[in-house]
Amino acid sequence: MKAIDKNWYDYSYFVTASKPFREQTGELNTFGYLGSNLIFFQSLVNYLQTHGVKYVSCLDVGAGIGDMIVANRNIGVNCEGVEYSPFIFTPLDQLKSQLKLEDYMVIANARPYMHQCDATKLPFPDKTFDIVTLIDVCEHIYEEDIPLVINEVKRSAKKWILTKTCTARGAYEEIFLKRGEKVPLEFEWLGVAGHVSSQTPDWWNSRWVDHEWRMEAEWAERFKLEMHLPDDWRGTMLYVRQ
């Protein structure tokens, strides 16, 4: 499998779920994200707003097709997003023929509030947003960029940071794939999703928590239970500026 870069996140990743890879068993398979999950993101936003995280401005890092942007703007929140996949910024007249109508409407409604950039240098002044969210994002960041992204997110957030990070278990909890290198055969199942940094929740928490930011572990656990989320949401955490 070729090296993972911004062009990995293309039509076959976001729309057709046709990225080929080899399972740990050796069996050939395909992977991808099949379109919008707006209903879930609306539930997520509503939960935040009614459970102690009331905000009027939001930045969604790694916004994908823009579900989080649309879900927030549907309730009047000023939400913007950043995404570095060139596919997401394909001209809308071209996308219309490639996407299901519901997916096209999400990306079309989110597009005016989307910025094409990576998260190592966010184009916003300090403390611009009440909350910055990273949903299924941190695992896509190469090791050397993680401190840069975390610093930029902390700089841009006024009060809260919400992360949901997929963490592999057992022997696969501490893996960094290398930028510019082909994905080893035994890690294709990880690389096909674009997951280049597979670490434990404790590892991630140790990077986010500092003298300015604390984690709200009880809130995050209650959130997981009340939203009926699976175990792989153990990487969900809310951080608060002290």
Image: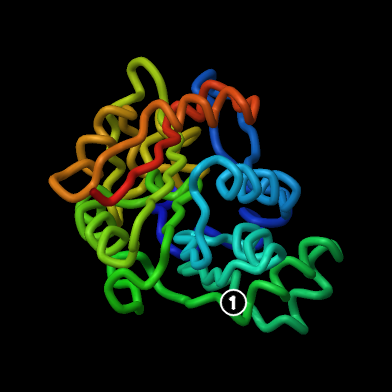
Q: In the picture, residue 31 is in which quadrant?
A: top right
Q: In the picture, residue 30 is in which quadrant?
A: top right
Rate crowding at label 1 as few (under 14), some (14 to 19) or many (20 or more) other CA atoms within 10 Å: some
| Relative to 146, 72 lies left or right | right
Q: In this figure, what is the number of numbered marks?
A: 1
Residue at coordinates 81% horizontally, 75% vertically from top-left?
Answer: 96
Please determine whether, in this image, residue 181 is positioned above or below residue 23. Answer: below
Residue at coordinates 25% horizontally, 65% vertically from top-left?
Answer: 155
| Relative to 5, 213 lies left or right | left
Please determine whether, in this image, residue 203 is positioned above or below residue 192. Answer: above
Residue at coordinates 53% horizontally, 65% vertically from top-left?
Answer: 56
Residue 72 % position (x, y): 63, 62
Please determine whether, in this image, residue 142 is positioned above or below residue 25. Answer: below
Residue 232 % position (x, y): 51, 26
Residue 24 % position (x, y): 49, 22
By what rule are the colours in the image chosen? rainbow
| Residue type highlighted by circle 1 | Phe
Residue 85 % position (x, y): 51, 67
Residue under label 1? 89
Residue 209 seen: yes
Residue 18 seen: no
Helix, strand or loop at disc 1?
A: helix
Residue nearest the observer in this picture, 98 or 3: 98
| Relative to 190, 15 lies left or right | right
- Taking the view exactly as shown, the residue that stands out farthest to the top is 170
- Taking the view exactly as shown, the residue that stands out farthest to the left is 211
Residue nearest the observer in this picture, 220 or 4: 220
Residue nearest the observer in this picture, 5 or 151: 151
Residue at coordinates 72% horizontally, 81% vertically from top-left?
Answer: 92
